Amino acid sequence: MRGRVRVAALFAGLILVPIPARAHHSFAMFDTTKRVTLAGTVTAFEWTNPHAYIELDVPDEKGTVTHWSIELGSPSILMQGGWKFKDLKYGDKVTAIVSPLKSGQLGALLSTITMPDGRVLGNGPLPPGGRQ
Amino acid sequence: MQAFRPAVSRLAAVSWLVLLLAASAHAQATPPNITGVWAPYRGGRGADPALAPPPATPLVLKPEYAVPFETRRKTEAEAAARGEPIASGAVACVPYGVPRMMSVALYPIEILPTPGQITIIAEAFSEARRIYLDKPQLAIDDVPPGYYGHSVGRWDGGTLVVDTVGIKTSVPAYQNMPHSDRMRITERLRLVSADILHDQITIDDPVVLEKPVTYTLAYRRMPGYEMVEFVCDNNREFIDEKGGTHLKVRDR
């Protein structure tokens, strides 16, 4: 994260964030010991392979907007977790908990997201026993 | 008449025996139904430990391969810690090939038997392999090296035994182990319960391995599941000059 970016950040060292099973690449690009909360507006939702993406505008308390690219699993893996390809659209308000890139660039791996309708979805199959 | 009745009984008994034997022979000759979609079954919470795959045998490389293999693993671990994991072929959307396509993360496979052939499609990267039944295997040197090589199979009772040769040496095998063009892969697929399938995979490579390595994949049947397409047309990962993996982020 860059210094000018103000987001509600929870740096919870050594907490393991649920991440999708590795298929396309290692997740070592992301700092999965960190969780950052990004509340913002969706500018794009790409239901694509090898990964789906949420592009998110995140305003700080002064109204300055930063833009994040959030990586998800693939459509197949997401569908196993209850996602649908029309679940998000331009302009939707969401709150995402993510693991940021170690490089400091404004990219991240999704952990969980609160959808416009209040549902909370993860980034992989449902855990045994039900919805995340 | 009295003498006739025992004869009839004996005849009936023999007829039943013949029918039972015929039914038994038919049952042995009919391969089990493994058609359809199968998802990885890795045990864990809620899983039946009796159906989980047994542990793998040790991977023992010859010393001249073991040293660079371990060095590479150390380099990979260091790169991952830096946040620049060394890219595998998958980062560039290159498929996995045999045998790794049989187990990619949580993606299912679809087994499609047709007369004389069994085709297996992996959902990840939409890979396909073809197993030709009851045909002799080709000599390794007659198979153009590739991702899927040449596979032949036969039913041994309830077990589908598959032999594969001709995997290109640049295609990583089990645990990314190196291998030579002499590698031979033997798979034994069998139902361990009505809806759990095991694929026991043995890799033999007299050039690279001290001894063959055997590991087992387990799958659960997914009735009604429709395979999802996987075309790698939005790959935002890129590989730097040192082989590290990075994510392209967008400004807007």
Image: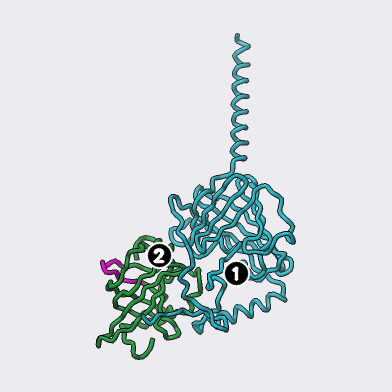
Chain colours: A green, B cyan
Total marks placed: 2
| Residue that appears at 63% across and 24% down | B14
Residue that carries the numbered disc 2 in the rendered image: A78
Which image quadrant for residue B188? bottom right
Looking at the rendered image, the quarter that the N terminus of chain B falls into is top right
Q: Position of residue B240 (x, y in %)?
A: 54, 82
Q: The residue under label 1 is which amino acid type?
A: Gln
Residue shown at 49% from the left, 53% from the top: B37
Query: Which region shows up in magenta?
Result: A112-119
Query: Chain under label 2?
Result: A
Residue B98 spot, x, y in % from top left: 61, 62
Is A118 contained in the magenta span?
A: yes
Which chain contains the residue that carries disc 1?
A: B
Which residue was labeled with disc 1? B175
For the residue pair B182 and B16, the one nearer the viewer reads as: B182
> Residue at the location (54% across, 73% down)?
B92
- Residue B247: percent from the left, percent from the top? 46, 79
| Residue A83 visible in the picture | no
Which label belongs to residue B218?
A: none
